[in-house]
Amino acid sequence: MTERYLAVVTGATGGIGSAICRRLSADGYAVIAHYRDNHDAAHALADSLGPHCHLVSADLSTMPGVYRVLTAVNDVLERHDGYVLRALVNNAAKLLGPAFFDATAEQFDHYFSINTRAPFFLAQGLTRCMLPGGSVVNISSASAGFSSPGDIVYAMSKAAVESLTRNMAEAIAPLGLRANTVIPGFTNNGHPAFDDPEVRRYMSSFSVLGDVGTPETVAHAVAFLVSDEAKRTTGAAIDVSGGSVLGARGERAAGVGSLLRHGE
């Protein structure tokens, strides 16, 4: 029987998530592609990747949604004897906003349920199913590294994800498993705002290398971290933000959330 590594990718229908799925599939992985409710995009992704792509729809803002993903992974492993769970990529996230003076308790809880609680409990559950050599990759954000009060709740949730990575790395090391973070900056995920020159200029101003990133850049970093080439890398953060965390370039206080909403 031929073994095939299996990767679980959350938020698979977004720009970054779908790029990660495509890259890992090209590297020979079977993929469990999680999505919330964009069924058309999910099935298009599965069609493009072939028979080793398995879909699971779940709302990760709820614990039943988290359990639904865990159950789906176990079901896929039971149906495919040759699959070996090798990677979890916590990519799904509630994006950008709300601002410090606008945030409600309900919004705060919603952001943290998706961006922080779901990654924690997915990792807790799935690392128990991984053999030595497996790894967890959490997708953070450059916003966790600079002040952006207009997007404070999002930024806080991503800072918590980076803390999760560091602490989890030690917890799972005795199992022969690793945990790392990838830090994108502003990444062109197909949102119409990226075609707005004002928004693009604002986002580009954060990067010392200029312009914005691509989903494929994030996917390359993930592919490295789940590979044996990174077998001595754990508790690390790979920054693919173009140097955005080196120091914001100005105009940052308003937060990008309002600009993105302007572009909708």
Image (cartoon, rainbow, N blue to C red):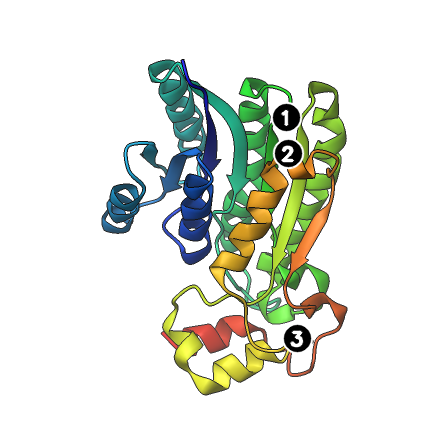
| Residue 51, x across and y down, in percent | 28, 32
Q: Earlier in the sequence, mark 3 or mark 1?
A: 1
Q: Judge left or right: residue 169 versus residue 188.
A: right
Q: Does residue 19 lie above or below 79 as drawn?
A: below
The circle drawn on residue 133 is 1
Q: Which residue is mark 2?
A: 228
Q: Amino acid at mark 1?
A: Gly
Q: Is residue 226 visible in the rendered structure shown here?
A: yes
Q: Judge left or right: residue 107 versus residue 45.
A: right
Q: Which residue is mark 3?
A: 209
| Residue 94, x across and y down, in percent | 48, 54
| Residue 142, x across and y down, in percent | 65, 62
> Measuring 55% from the left and 51% from the top, which residue is drawn there?
220
Along the line of sight, the residue nearer the viewer: 179 or 82: 82
The C terminus is located in which quarter? bottom left
Give the foreground label among 2 and 3.
2
> Measuring 25% from the left and 48% from the top, which residue is drawn there?
44
The circle drawn on residue 102 is none
Q: Earlier in the sequence, mark 1 or mark 2?
A: 1
| Residue 181, x across and y down, in percent | 65, 46
Q: Does residue 260 lie above or below 52 as drawn?
A: below
Give me the C-alpha separation between circle 2 and circle 3.
29 Å
Along the line of sight, the residue nearer the viewer: 222 or 150: 222
Q: Amino acid at mark 3?
A: Leu
